[in-house]
Amino acid sequence: MKMQYDLSIINGRLVYKDQVFKGHIGVKNGKIAIITNRKDMLFNAKKIIDANDNYILPGLIDSHVHFRTPGLTYKETWKTASRAAVAGGVTTVLDMPNTNPYLSKVDLIDEKNNLIKGTSLVDYGFHFGVEPGKSYYLNLLNSNMIASVKVFLTGHHTAKNIIKDRTELEEIFRIAAQKNIILTLHAEDEDTLNLFRQYNNAPTNLIEYERHLSRSAGIIAIGKAIELVKQYGTQVHVLHVSSAEEVELLEVAAKAGYPITFETTPHQLWFDAMKDVELGSRVKLSPAIRCEKDQLKLWKSLINGTMISVGSDHAPHSNVEKKRDFYEAPPGLPGVQEILPVLITGLMKNYPDLTFEEILSKVVSVMAEGPSKLFKISDRKGRIEEGLDADFTIIDPEDEWVVKKEDIYSLCQWSAYEGETLKGRPFMTIRRGKVVYLNGEFGEADGKLLTFKEFDPSKFNEFMSSPFQQLNKMKAFRRTNIL
């Protein structure tokens, strides 16, 4: 007797990080039960979706969001943020700790989860925070509880817990290495930024702001991080990298075999401080939006695979806050809904020789497989593979989207991309076998808290997929054979 599936998806083009092929998917109990080229095997199903030759991507993972729960829900609620997420094809998010209270104690994990239950269209996990003078709390963590420990080397309006003391920073690196916990870094050096603040006037526009939040601070912070990675063997992931020089430094560190990875944001890839100055505080970020040469280097690292992930850094503020004088306006902007079409459209503009399928494969690499591996959920998420969660994003390659504020589901009700024409907007998002988004309609808010699998740090080079790590494997093979 044929198995009855809960859901069958037929006539799709399935997207992987290195290929696209036509196929059909059967789903049972929220998992991918079968992938086949015979759709006749899937007709015995409670529900059948015809993908009509559109592209099916694995559900996207946004590993860097600020959904503002708890304490900052006038900016965003988990309900509205998760609506924006699934409308953008995102089925899993990892939320940052700078809320109120700051997520820096183990008991707050359950408290935060209890606030979210029943409101989330996405599955979710948390990054943990560390407060100055309280790094001992990290000793109470187990690595399966959290995605990472977030360390702010500088701060801003909603990030007050800056780790300035070198001894304490070393202790954080030591504990993280001992417990096999990833450190995610906001890597800008506070002392360096203070020097620039001391001798520069308060910035009044994006160009002045780019110089005010100097790239030097990022370069110095990453240099310090590499030194500590070398000393303690800690696995480190650098967030929202903004400059070409930072990319070069991180690529050299990866080539040297250090367990260090990095990501950027769609905003850093799309906006230019010199060309988009009229957008003002709408695209005021920390780190600052930089220039064309930096964008080109970031796009190149995405294309060549040295960038492991892209996170939206979805950080909405109210319109009132963003309309303050430039210097007083808080840094950050929404982006979880726009990230997929921004990446697709940006790749089309910058790499016109790539086919649409090659572009989708690049997106899957940095927004599905890459973050799933990095943050230890690849046994459930990140690929269209039998046995994994049935998370899918379906897009029509011909669909274009002119971004309008009335189409934005974030509570803040604005987007820095308003007026832009983007391609690749999802029309259907499926999470664990349930349709959670379909052309403006939303499904059941029964997203779940993730746990994170144990990871052997000695397997880092084998596990991650940077070209440099592959190169190191080849060199090791050759040395062994020569000897």
Image (cartoon, rainbow, N blue to C red):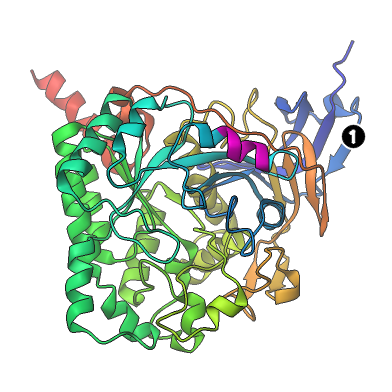
Q: Residue at x 29, y 66 (%)?
A: 243
- Give the position of the N terminus as an image quadrant: top right
Q: Is residue 118 left or right of residue 90?
A: right
Q: Is residue 256 visible?
A: no
Q: Position of residue 140 (x, y in %)?
A: 39, 26
Q: Which span is picked out in magenta? A: 110-115
Q: Residues within 10 Å of mark 1 (few under 14, many from 20)?
A: few
Give SS at disc 1.
loop
Question: Is residue 170 or residue 216 the one in the foreground?
Answer: 170
Q: Residue furthest top?
A: 1
Question: Is residue 39 or residue 16 the one in the foreground?
Answer: 16
Q: Position of residue 179 (x, y in %)?
A: 32, 25
Q: Residue at x 58, y 58 (%)?
A: 72
- Give the position of the C terminus as an image quadrant: top left
Q: Position of residue 80 (x, y in %)?
A: 71, 57
Q: Is residue 246 left or right of residue 90?
A: left
Q: Position of residue 161 (x, y in %)?
A: 35, 53
Q: Residue furthest left?
A: 483
Question: Is residue 257 or residue 443 the one in the foreground?
Answer: 443
Residue designated by label 1? 47
Q: Is residue 466 visible?
A: yes
Question: Is residue 4 or residue 169 the one in the foreground?
Answer: 169
Give the quadrant of residue 321.
bottom right
Q: Label 1 amino acid?
A: Lys
Q: Is residue 191 left or right of residue 415?
A: left
Q: Residue at x 53, y 47 (%)?
A: 95
Residue 306 in the image: above or below residue 312: above
Residue 397 in the image: above or below residue 25: below
Residue 482 in the image: above or below residue 226: above
Give the quadrant of residue 286.
bottom left
